[in-house]
Amino acid sequence: MPAVQGYVIEADEPGNYYHRSGSWVDYTSPANAYVWTPDETASIANAADNTWAHKPELAHPAIHDPATGVTVLTGKAVPINTVQGQNVQVPSTGGALFDLKAATGLAPASVVAMSVSL
C-alpha cells in the first residue's frame, strides 16, 4: 500500500483532529491523527457548517506510511480553506466529538488502563 500524502486536519479547538470516523478526536500531537488527501481535506472544509461542534481550521501537511504506521509532518500548518481539491465523499458525523464509550463500550479510563497494560 503506497504512502498517503496530504493533511492532518485540526479543529478550531486546538488538539482536536478530524478522525477517519468523521468525528473529532483529542490527540496530543497532529502526528497521531489521520492523513487526508488534498481532495478529502478540501471536501471536509466545505462540509463544515454552523451546526458542527468544532470547525476545521488548520491543515498540517503530512505523509503517512501504512506499512510502518508512521506519520511525519512535512511543513507548517496552513488555513484549511487554502487547500485546493475536488469535491469527494468523506465520512462525517456532522462535526460531533468522538464518543469513545459509544464506539467501544468502554469508558476512557478503561482504554487508558488497557493501553498501559499492553
Image (cartoon, rainbow, N blue to C red):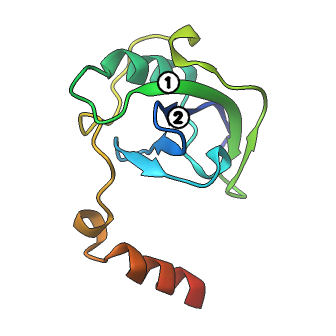
Mark 2: which amino acid?
A: Glu
Residue at the image point whose x is 46% and y is 37% from the top: 13
Asked if residue 79 can be seen in this view, the reply is yes
Name the residue carrying label 2.
10
In the rendered image, residue 25, in percent from the top left (x then y), is placed at 43, 50
Q: Is residue 110 above or below residue 20?
A: below
In the rendered image, residue 35, in percent from the top left (x then y), is placed at 58, 38
Residue at the image point whose x is 53% and y is 39% from the top: 14
- Answer with left or right where residue 49 lies relative to residue 75: left
Q: Secondary structure at mark 1?
A: strand
In the rendered image, residue 40, in percent from the top left (x then y), is placed at 46, 25
Location of residue 76 (image quadrant): top right
Q: Is residue 83 above or below residue 68?
A: above
Tell me the crowding category of disc 2: few under 14, some 14 to 19, or many 20 or more residues within 10 angstroms, Cα based. Answer: many
Q: Of the two numbered discs 1 and 2 on the same chain, state the one appearing first in sequence.
A: 2
Q: Secondary structure at mark 2?
A: strand
Residue at the image point whose x is 32% and y is 36% from the top: 91
What separation in Å lies between label 1 and label 2 (alpha carbons)? Answer: 6 Å
Q: Nearer the viewer, residue 5 or 108?
A: 108
Asked if residue 118 can be seen in this view, the reply is no
- Answer with left or right where residue 87 lies relative to residue 7: left
Q: Nearer the viewer, residue 71 or 96?
A: 96
Q: Nearer the viewer, residue 50 or 68?
A: 50
Label annotation for residue 36: none
Mark 1: which amino acid?
A: Glu
Q: Is residue 30 above or below residue 108?
A: above
Name the residue carrying label 1.
57
Residue at the image point whose x is 32% and y is 22% from the top: 48
Task: Quadrant for the C terminus, please.
Answer: bottom right
Tell me the crowding category of disc 1: few under 14, some 14 to 19, or many 20 or more residues within 10 angstroms, Cα based. Answer: some
Location of residue 74 (image quadrant): top right
Of all residues, the one furthest to the front in this rendering is: 13
